[in-house]
Image (cartoon, helix red, strand yellow):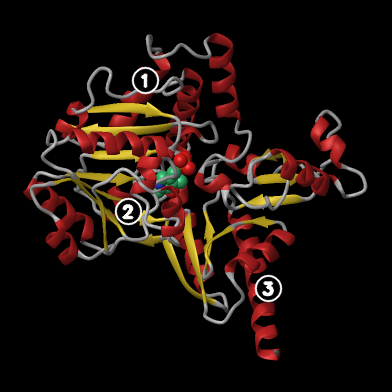
């Protein structure tokens, strides 16, 4: 591990930083979290339920709440803060760009935007496809998928009204991406959604073959379904999907919003899971900006030409500050061999986690890890709360799964400390179960 990464993961123990007004207000009678949460409830729409904590500061893999409690952040803003918090490369890139030129609109371009598009093409399509690839820059994952959906609509000039998505898929919350998202509780309150979307069982090649035809514009898949509990598509599925979509002229769209930008141990999870498969469209966001909002669509071949002038747009997309952050992320991952780090730490950690009593199975790749709990344990949300009390931030995408998506700079010691804490929490939960 590099010296810089080690330094970053060892944040100072002091939480009484008097130069930080938020932290300063925090240290006191231990009621700062509760006070902020009350004000939150009175000011912020209740779309997320009550937040677990009020966070005021972060450095490396640590964050601190308003009452001064320290946490190891193993969720990283849901697979976003891939370099941890306050990484000097991102801070410097954003500061330099913002103090030089902060925003220009899409009547203009900037060197940061052009350089990022070039980088994304070579990372996403490392082979000959790079030559005929183009990028659209957006601000989030759902927006990247909106653009991909519009590309699919343009494909076939009206003769391909159908779009296939997978059961348990998550592609975002705006109306188009929501139409591609499986969960009924997310979708149904907002119907009618854009039409023509059909869901087929994930990983079932026969079902895909039956559903495909010359009227299908596209198939959209996540290589590892994150929100569904970190479930990778079975071996061979992406290869079959590529062959079958090509045979009927449908586009293959791979949503790498959560799995991309090194999280799996490769730049793109599909490079690992299905080497040789070249999709038509790849969508990115989460880790791309290392914490600064940005999304991207990288398309190749005909798909790269389907949106013409006036057919899509965004005021903020391609903003130079966001592009500078993404360039810093890419440069740092590359120069510090963080892909290798993610791969090595991820596989060793997964082995250790799988040996913990109460863990049924460990899924995922690299540092996107789903810990499947054995039957009969309390819901994963309760386990996550017990871990938060011990100073570890994780989440529970399903009642039987804990998700880890930590910064790539996590140290071996921090990973081990979590494994020990998980073991203690699950041992206690198992013994309470036996005792009850
Ligand atoms: C998070 C996520 C999205 C949505 O991204 P937002 O930035 O929250 O809009 C889309 N697809 C996948 C696979 C995701 O994990």
Q: Give x and y (percent) for residue 408.
A: 52, 46
- Looking at the image, residue 373 lies above or below residue 144: below
Q: Give x and y (percent) for residue 132.
A: 17, 27
Q: Nearer the viewer, mark 2 or mark 1?
A: 2
Closer to the camera in the image, 181 or 379: 181
- Residue 363 relative to residue 275: left or right: right
- Looking at the image, residue 166 lies above or below residue 303: below
**Sequence-first tag of 3 and 1:** 1
Ligand 1 position by quadrant? top left
Q: Residue 115 carries which label?
A: 1
Closer to the camera in the image, 196 or 428: 196
Question: What's the distance in space between the residues labelled 3 and 1, CA to CA?
Answer: 48 Å
Residue behind mark 3: 424
**Sequence-first tag of 2 and 1:** 1
Closer to the camera in the image, 136 or 351: 136
Q: Which mark is residue 223?
A: 2
Identified at 32% across, 60% down, the residue is 167
Asked if the residue at tag 1 contacts the one at tag 2, i.e. Cβ–Cβ closer than 8 Å, the answer is no
Circle 1 packing at 10 Å, graded few (<14), some (14-19), many (20+), is: few
The quadrant in which residue 399 appears is bottom right
């Amino acid at each position: 591990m590099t010296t810089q990464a080690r330094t970053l993961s060892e944040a100072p123990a002091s939480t009484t930083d008097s130069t930080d007004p938020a932290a300063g207000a925090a240290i006191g009678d231990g009621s700062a979290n509760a006070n902020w949460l009350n004000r939150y409830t009175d000011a912020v729409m209740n779309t997320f339920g009550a937040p677990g904590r009020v966070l005021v500061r972060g450095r490396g893999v640590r964050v601190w709440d308003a009452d001064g409690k320290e946490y190891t952040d193993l969720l990283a803003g849901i697979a976003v803060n891939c370099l941890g918090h306050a990484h000097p490369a991102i801070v410097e890139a954003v500061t330099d760009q913002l103090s030089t030129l902060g925003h220009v609109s899409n009547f203009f371009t900037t060197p940061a935007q052009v350089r990022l598009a070039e980088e994304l093409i070579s990372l996403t399509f490392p082979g000959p496809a790079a030559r005929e690839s183009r990028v659209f820059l957006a601000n989030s994952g759902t927006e990247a998928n909106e653009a991909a959906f519009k590309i699919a609509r343009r494909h076939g000039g009206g003769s391909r009204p159908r779009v296939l998505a997978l059961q348990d898929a998550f592609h975002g919350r705006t109306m188009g991406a929501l139409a591609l998202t499986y969960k009924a509780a997310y979708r149904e309150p907002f119907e009618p959604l854009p039409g023509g979307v059909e869901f087929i069982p994930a990983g079932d090649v026969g079902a895909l073959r039956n559903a495909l035809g010359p009227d299908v514009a596209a198939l959209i898949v996540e290589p590892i379904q994150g929100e569904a509990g970190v479930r990778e598509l079975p071996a061979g599925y992406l290869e079959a999907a590529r062959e079958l979509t090509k045979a009927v002229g449908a586009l293959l769209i791979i949503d790498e919003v959560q799995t991309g930008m090194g999280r799996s141990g490769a730049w793109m999870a599909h490079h690992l899971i299905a080497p040789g498969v070249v999709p038509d469209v790849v969508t990115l966001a989460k880790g791309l900006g290392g914490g600064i909002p940005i999304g991207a669509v990288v398309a190749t071949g005909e798909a790269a030409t389907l949106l013409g002038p006036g057919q899509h747009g965004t005021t903020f997309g391609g903003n130079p500050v966001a592009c500078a952050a993404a360039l810093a992320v890419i440069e740092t991952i590359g120069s510090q061999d963080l892909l290798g780090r993610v791969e090595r730490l991820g596989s060793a950690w997964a082995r250790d986690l799988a040996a913990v009593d109460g863990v049924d199975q460990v899924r995922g790749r690299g540092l996107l890890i789903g810990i499947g709990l054995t039957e009969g344990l309390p819901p994963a949300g309760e386990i996550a709360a017990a871990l938060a009390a011990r100073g570890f931030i994780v989440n529970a995408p399903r009642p039987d799964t804990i998700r880890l998506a930590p910064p790539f700079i996590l140290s071996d010691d921090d990973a081990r400390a979590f494994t020990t804490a998980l073991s203690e929490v699950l041992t206690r939960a198992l013994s309470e179960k036996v005792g009850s």
